[in-house]
Image (cartoon, rainbow, N blue to C red):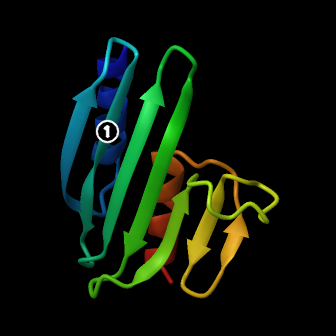
Amino acid sequence: MIEEYFLQVENVLREFPNIRSYALNKKVYNSRQGTIGGKVIFENEYSLEFVEVADTEQGIKTKYRYHYMDDAQNLIFRYDNAPHHPQIESFPHHKHLADNVQASQEPDLRIVLFEIMQYSKK
């Protein structure tokens, strides 16, 4: 089941035409749990580094991080669920911007890639 999840993540990456390349790292803990992450390079040389720790039996990501940067490695945004902003109403889910942290729902990779596409059209 975790291998199927990994395949779904890779298929999402293949859907987006603005991705120039990507490299993935996968670790299987057992048939239903594992970690997938990697680095995505876009046509404009911006990048997304991400990691998801998934449990397919429970249908959740126990940890995630989606860190989008410009070509000079400056943060544009990062979604994560690290428990370091308890004041945020959506704790532990939140979004970092260059100058603040805001509440957010847990995104998935496809949502993040759509946001990146919208950002690059600006």
Residue situated in front as seen by the camera: 31 or 5? 31
Residue 30 versus residue 40 in the image, above or below: above
Residue 97 versus residue 39 in the image, above or below: below
Residue 84: x, y in percent?
62, 62
Residue 35: x, y in percent?
34, 35
Residue 40 versus residue 70 in the image, above or below: above
Q: Quadrant of the N terminus?
A: top left
Residue 113 visible somewhere in the drawing: no
Residue type (three-letter) at the residue carrying disc 1:
Ile
> Can you identify the residue that label 1 sits on?
36
Kindly identify the residue that appears in the image at 32 percent across and 14 percent down: 30
Q: Is residue 53 left or right of residue 41?
A: right
Q: Is residue 36 left or right of residue 61?
A: left
Residue 57 visible somewhere in the drawing: yes
Q: Describe the element under mark 1 as helix, strand or loop.
A: strand
Residue 108: x, y in percent?
52, 45
Residue 80 versus residue 35 in the image, above or below: below
Residue 94: x, y in percent?
65, 61
Q: Quadrant of residue 88?
A: bottom right
